[in-house]
């Protein structure tokens, strides 16, 4: 462990105390890490300070498959037992004592730490990042899977000088000795749950902003992505300032960082003071209208209060994290995009929740095994209805009191409800039963709330009743709704719901005069057939500044007008699209499937499409490339090899897709032989899933 001694010296140079637990209270942790990327291991050490609250004869920490080389209590070696998931130390600890526990170890984490790009030949894409959501940090650090053990963590990390290191807290020191890899020392001032501990390493630059309250906001980006910084992080400062004012409690940490990472498991993760998010959301200005980072940005930032400052006791109270972050993110979008955006978004989620409820698949918000849809969207609705029940002033007062009373502690739903009852003077038993306990989603109550909150939604519901009663949508009725004050959400919903009842002459007028990309996009996605007299109007959609519209219209026009396929392909040949290359992947597929289109380039088109199945691309790109190649029967040995490797990918969504596709191919004798031939050239570790089929 090169320079680990220096790292421990640095650990001892900075110290202050924090708080919390049961018989033993772990207060402070000085963590020293030295990642070894090529071996995918972490060499580390940690010094814990803890107080004994009651007499106890042993302590333990969660430690999954970690090898310990040194264990000392108060500077003396002590016997320990390291099992598969924990390390335990037997000793008579007496009430009132304080101790120092030192652990040195090596971990080869099967999850939670991800070493990206170290096995390929792409220079500069190497990364390490962590994802400890839930209770997984114990794969790389002896720590606490229980969210109720809150500790003040400081991280000291040794890394190759080519890379930037980002972690929780404030960077106090970066050593700069000539010829040596630097050591980065990060300091936290307040305690947090272990699952929120995080670090990332890679080649980054950063944009630095300052909030109205003086908090430093660091927005990281890849070295060649400087033109995407503004559209990706658009409104970041505004969201931050809005939350501090709306929540009424100051941002609780020293600074805030946002870091895009490759092959991330989710959209984003709210590590304390350091959000990591998928680089699939690092966008250009054109992508902003269809696929921006604003909601994720706001959602993860809201978690710094709801989840990080005040943390659930267990998953039964998960609404206190995800429902709150979802609702406050919607409020931030309301601040930025307006009231109509907010209420129509709630309407969309209400429809989804109502449909699920009608199928008998609704869930209680107190069910620890409920779906993400329940915790996020039904949870957001519960807060909207709570604010409506108690009034905005009392709602804000209750939120503020709740956060201040339980800061750096763990809570239950009942704790929150009590604070809201005290703030409002109301009994919230009925609210709790209807919105938290009940499995059904009450659409009628939700609809009444939307009707009184937004006049255009009220008009829309009235319009729905009239059209559904007559089954006719003539031009006169349409004109009544189609004026400059009507929000695009209203118009788009009419198109989506009633496209079959809108005449071609009306669509012609809309496409000729409508400037809203979102409304035009609704026509593009809703109109299944394109008659000849509308062709030129639909062709104009290919010019819209929307990669999603371009993708839809390229396929629709290519399919509807075979004689014009070359024209459409020529028009879109230089467009990549969103970060997931949606337009380019479709274009390559259509070019390969179009007879006589640039036949001399067909080999190159196929080679490029196959190349996107490689691990250096994010799972969304790879999955689309696999699917298109499968559909046009163009998988080759390179694609088969990449698919076999993908069946072991760390992202479960992508891994499951790859396994399903491999299962399908395995059922075809000819492709099965090709897969077996390719498998003979791969490493045994690549064949973990395939071996289950070979056996």
Image (cartoon, rainbow, N blue to C red):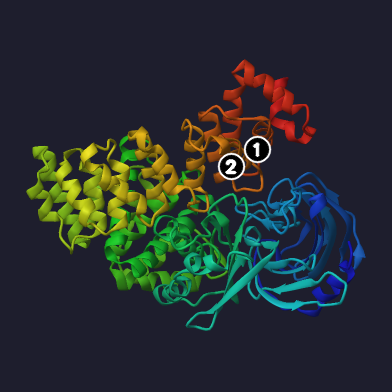
Comparing 445 with 619, the one in front is 619
Residue 50 percent location from the top left of the image: 75, 67
| Residue 272 vertical placement versus 253 (above, below) | above
Residue drawn at point x = 64 percent, y = 54 percent: 131
Residue 247 percent location from the top left of the image: 42, 72
Residue 61 visible in rendering: yes
Residue drawn at point x = 68 percent, y = 25 percent: 675
The residue pinned by badge 1 equals 646
Q: In the rendered image, which quarter contains the N terminus?
A: bottom right
Residue 433 visible in rendering: no
Q: How many marks?
A: 2
* 341 horizontally vs 328: left or right: left
Residue 251 percent location from the top left of the image: 52, 75
Comparing 79 with 278, the one in front is 278
* 386 horizontally vs 23: left or right: left
Q: Quadrant of residue 55?
A: bottom right
Comparing 481 with 592, the one in front is 592
Tell us which disc is closer to us: 1 or 2: 2
Q: Are marks 1 and 2 in contact (CB under 8 Å)?
A: yes
Q: In the rendered image, which quarter contains the C terminus?
A: top right
Q: Secondary structure at mark 1?
A: helix
């Amino acid at each position: 462990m090169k320079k680990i001694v220096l790292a421990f010296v640095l650990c001892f140079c900075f110290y202050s105390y924090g708080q919390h637990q049961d018989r033993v209270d772990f207060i402070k942790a000085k963590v020293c890490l030295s990642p070894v990327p090529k071996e995918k291991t972490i060499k580390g050490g940690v010094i814990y300070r803890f107080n004994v609250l009651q007499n106890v004869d042993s302590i333990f920490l969660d430690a999954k498959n970690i090898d310990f080389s040194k264990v000392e209590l108060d500077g003396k070696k002590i016997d320990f037992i390291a099992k598969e998931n924990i390390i335990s130390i037997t000793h008579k600890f007496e009430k009132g004592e304080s101790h120092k526990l030192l652990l040195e170890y090596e971990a080869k984490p099967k999850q939670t730490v991800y070493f990206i790009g170290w096995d390929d030949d792409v220079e500069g894409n190497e990364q390490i990042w962590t994802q400890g959501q839930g209770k997984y940090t114990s794969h790389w650090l002896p720590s606490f899977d229980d969210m109720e053990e809150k500790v003040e963590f400081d991280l000291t990390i040794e890394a190759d000088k080519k890379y930037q290191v980002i972690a929780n807290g404030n960077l106090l020191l970066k050593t700069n000795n000539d010829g040596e890899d630097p050591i980065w020392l990060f300091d936290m001032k307040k305690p947090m749950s272990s699952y929120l501990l995080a670090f990332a390493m890679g080649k980054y630059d950063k944009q630095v902003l300052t909030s109205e309250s003086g908090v430093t906001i660091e927005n990281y980006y890849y070295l060649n992505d400087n033109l995407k910084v503004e559209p990706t992080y658009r409104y970041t400062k505004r969201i931050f300032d809005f939350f501090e004012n709306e929540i009424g409690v100051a941002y609780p940490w020293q600074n805030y960082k946002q870091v895009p990472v490759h092959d991330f498991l989710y959209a984003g993760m709210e590590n304390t003071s350091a959000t990591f998010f998928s680089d699939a959301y690092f966008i250009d200005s054109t992508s902003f209208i269809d696929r921006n980072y604003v909601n994720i940005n706001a959602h993860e930032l809201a978690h710094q209060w709801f989840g990080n400052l005040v943390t659930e006791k267990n998953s039964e109270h998960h609404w206190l994290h995800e429902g709150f972050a979802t609702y406050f993110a919607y409020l931030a979008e309301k601040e930025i995009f307006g009231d109509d955006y907010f209420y129509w978004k709630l309407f969309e989620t209400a429809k989804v929740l109502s449909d699920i409820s009608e199928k008998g698949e609704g869930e209680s918000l107190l069910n620890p095994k409920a779906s993400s849809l329940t915790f996020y969207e039904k949870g957001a609705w519960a807060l909207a209805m709570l604010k409506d029940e108690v009034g905005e002033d009392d709602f804000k007062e209750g939120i503020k009191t709740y956060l201040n009373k339980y800061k750096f502690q763990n809570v239950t739903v009942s704790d929150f409800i009590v604070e809201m009852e005290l703030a409002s003077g109301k009994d919230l038993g009925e609210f709790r039963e209807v919105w938290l306990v009940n499995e059904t989603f009450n659409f009628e109550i939700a609809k009444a709330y939307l009707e009184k909150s937004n006049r255009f939604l009220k008009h829309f519901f009235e319009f729905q009743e009239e059209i559904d009663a007559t089954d006719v949508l003539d031009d006169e009725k349409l004109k009544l709704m189609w004026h400059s004050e009507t929000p695009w959400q209203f118009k788009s919903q009419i198109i989506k719901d009633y496209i079959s009842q809108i005449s071609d002459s009306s669509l012609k007028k809309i496409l000729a005069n409508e400037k809203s990309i979102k409304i035009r996009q609704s026509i593009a996605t809703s109109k299944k057939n394109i008659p000849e007299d509308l062709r030129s109007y639909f062709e104009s959609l290919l010019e819209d500044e929307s990669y999603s519209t371009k993708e839809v219209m390229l396929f629709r026009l290519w399919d509807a007008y075979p004689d014009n396929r070359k024209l459409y392909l020529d028009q879109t040949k230089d467009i990549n699209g969103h970060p997931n290359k949606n337009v380019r992947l479709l274009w390559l597929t259509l070019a390969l499937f179009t007879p006589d289109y640039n036949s001399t380039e067909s080999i190159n088109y196929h080679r490029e499409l196959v190349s996107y199945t490689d691990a250096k691309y994010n799972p969304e790109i790879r999955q689309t490339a696999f699917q298109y190649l499968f559909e046009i029967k163009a998988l080759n040995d390179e694609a088969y090899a990449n698919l076999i490797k993908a069946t072991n990918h760390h992202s479960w969504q992508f891994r499951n897709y790859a396994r399903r596709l491999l299962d399908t191919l395995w059922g075809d004798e000819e492709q099965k032989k090709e897969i077996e031939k390719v498998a003979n050239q791969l490493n045994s570790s690549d064949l973990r899933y395939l071996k289950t089929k070979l056996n």
